[in-house]
C-alpha cells in the first residue's frame, strides 16, 4: 500500500497556494492542505499540524 505524504501550507490567506504553483505532478504522492487562518496558540498549532509530514510556511507581505 502506497500512503501519500501529507503537506500543510500555512498562511495561505489569499487562497493562491494551489493555483500559483504547478502541484499537479505531486498530487499522486502528496495530499496538500492549506491553512488560511491564524491558528492561535502553540498548542493549537501542534494539534493541527502533528499528523503532517511536510509543513510549508508562506511569506507574509505587509502593506
Image (cartoon, rainbow, N blue to C red):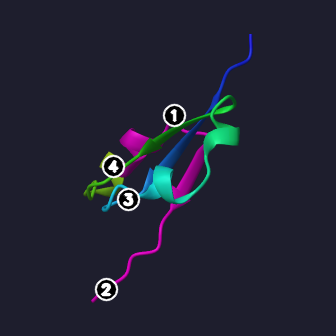
60 inside magenta stretch: yes
Q: Is residue 6 left or right of residue 61?
A: right
| Residue 22 place in picture, x, y as percent | 62, 51
The residue segment tinted magenta is 45-63
Which residue occupies 25% across, 57% down?
40
Looking at the image, is 39 positioned above or below residue 25? below
Mark 3: few/some/many CA within 10 Å (<14, 14-19, 20+): some
Q: Residues within 10 Å of mark 2 (few under 14, many from 20)?
A: few
Location of the N terminus (image quadrant): top right
- Find the distance from the CA under tag 2 to the CA under tag 4: 26 Å
Q: Foreground: 52 or 35?
A: 35
Give me the disc on residue 11.
none
On the image, the x and y values in percent for residue 52 come to 54, 38
Residue at the spot x=43%, y=56% of the render? 10
- Magenta includes 29? no
Q: Residue furthest top?
A: 1
Q: Earlier in the sequence, mark 4 or mark 1?
A: 4
Q: Nearer the viewer, mark 2 or mark 4?
A: 2
What is the C-alpha distance between the residues marked 3 and 1? 19 Å
Residue 15 at x, y percent in the picture? 35, 55
User: Which numbered marker is on residue 43?
Assistant: 4
Q: Earlier in the sequence, mark 3 or mark 4?
A: 3
Q: CA distance from mark 1 to mark 2?
A: 30 Å
Q: Which mark is residue 62?
A: 2
Mark closer to the observer (3, 1): 3
Element marked by disc 3: loop
The residue pinned by badge 3 equals 12
Gap between marks 3 and 4, in whole Å? Answer: 20 Å
Q: In whole angstroms, how far apart are the C-alphas of marks 4 and 1?
A: 14 Å
Check the image and report above or below for 57 versus 34.
below
Amino acid at each position: 500500500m502506497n500512503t501519500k505524504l501529507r503537506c500543510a501550507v500555512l498562511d495561505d490567506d489569499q487562497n493562491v497556494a494551489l493555483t500559483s504553483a504547478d502541484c499537479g505532478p505531486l498530487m499522486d504522492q502528496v495530499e496538500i492542505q492549506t491553512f488560511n487562518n491564524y491558528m492561535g496558540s502553540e498548542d493549537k498549532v501542534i494539534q493541527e499540524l502533528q499528523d503532517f509530514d511536510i509543513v510549508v510556511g508562506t511569506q507574509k507581505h505587509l502593506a
